[in-house]
Amino acid sequence: MLHTDMLPRDTAVQLIDADGQPVADEHYALPDGDTLLAAYRGLVEGRRINDQAGALVRQGRLAVYPSSHGQEACQIAAAMVLGGTDWLFPTYRDSVAVIARGVEPADAMVLLKGDWHSGYDVRAHRVAPQATPLATQLLHAVGFAQAAKHRGEDTVVLALCGDGATSEGDFHEAMNFAAVFQVPVVFFVQNNGFAISVPLSRQTAAPSLAHKAIGYGMPGQRVDGNDVAAVLAVLGEAVNRARAGGGPSLVEAHTYRMQAHTNADDDTRYRERDEVQAWTARDPLLRLRTHLTGTGALDAEAEERFAAGAEEIAAAMRTALNTDADLDPEDLFRFVTTTRSPQLDEQWHLLRDEIERSRLADASAEITPNGGHR
């Protein structure tokens, strides 16, 4: 028997259209004004974080930055729907969600600067380290949620991924395990159209990524990923369902990556500028601003306050990342295992000796042939 209640809608859920006008929905209610105002503040801060990170890459202060410009509605909603006991499992593109969850912006950038494995205390913020390999964090999220269920904890795990991750075996394993064991996890796919340069049409023949859910025995839903109100409503329902013991869900957000995959990517090789520009009118920030201004919930004073707060975040990022870190080379080996293996110990001694030889060579080069110093 076909469980039609598990099937997603033919069109994505939308509560505020591209012109900022409310859209009536028989199932999902438009979030209240205070919630939308808080979401708008998050969007303003998220956009500023993306812009500042891009500038820091160009200045050589960040090694790489996968921008979520245009996807901020998904980022902010993901953080807002979670409670204090819940966990977020992000990807490398989810820095804005990580920061919105309470991690200091400078700490969230450490991984992308290349200084450390993760710059924040995952337990303090209930945010797992950002994952660069595709879909690996989905298995971690399911295992964490299953452990929380066994302990009887009030914990829902929100696992983020992109459309490219749905082509990985880890995605299948995570979905299957979560459904079989009714794990309190929500899979949130930010479908931005491309897995680096591979379009969605080359990844799946399914009507949508959300349709994959029914094959595992869980409900799936599609949502306009540039409508933060709709994302809040759909994700919020999935989180509440998991918390009540209803098991996992898959939510697919239809959005778009307005900028290149990372600063190392040339997106002009695989998509036309006209395609990118067509999404400009669907900007999640402008859409919510138009709606809130029209309802009178957002005025010039609030706009200035939010912009000032976003600039404070950007300034803190600049200050932190313009400071050179005092690195200890032995840290490369110190935290790999609890007890360092003989092989790692040998590698550390080789590196230490090489560093010492380089130091002595530099000191010798400073001494002139007649015994003086340059």
Image (cartoon, rainbow, N blue to C red):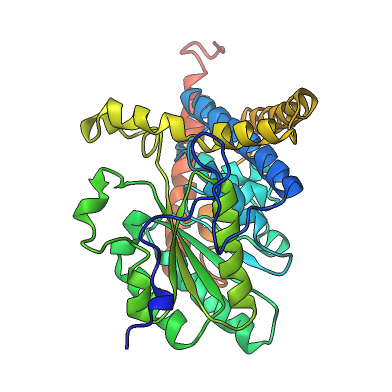
Q: Is residue 118 visible to the viewer in this orientation of the structure?
A: no
Q: Quadrant of residue 292?
A: top right
Where is residue 195 drawn, in percent x and y? 30, 49
Tell me residue 171's x, y (percent). 36, 69
* 363 up-or-down from 157: above or below: above
As drawn, 194 above or below 281 = below
Q: Position of residue 267 (x, y in %)?
A: 29, 33
Using the rendered view, name the quadrant where residue 164 is placed: bottom left
Name the foreground residue: 112 vs 150.
150
Q: Residue at x 75, y 23 (%)?
A: 300
Residue 123's place in the image compared with 49, above or below, is below
The residue at the point 55 percent across, 72 percent down is 339
Work out which quarter of the rendered image holds the N terminus and state it: bottom left
- Which residue shows up at 68% across the image and 58% down it? 121
Locate residue 19, reporting x and y percent: 51, 33
> Is 321 located above or below residue 39 in the figure?
above
Where does the C terminus fall, quadrant-wise?
A: top right
Q: Is residue 155 left or right of residue 246?
A: right
Numbered disc total: 0
Name the side, left or right, on which 347 lies relative to 265.
Answer: right
- Residue closest to the eye, 208 or 187: 208
Which of 214/200 is in front? 214
Q: Residue at left 30%, top 44%?
A: 196
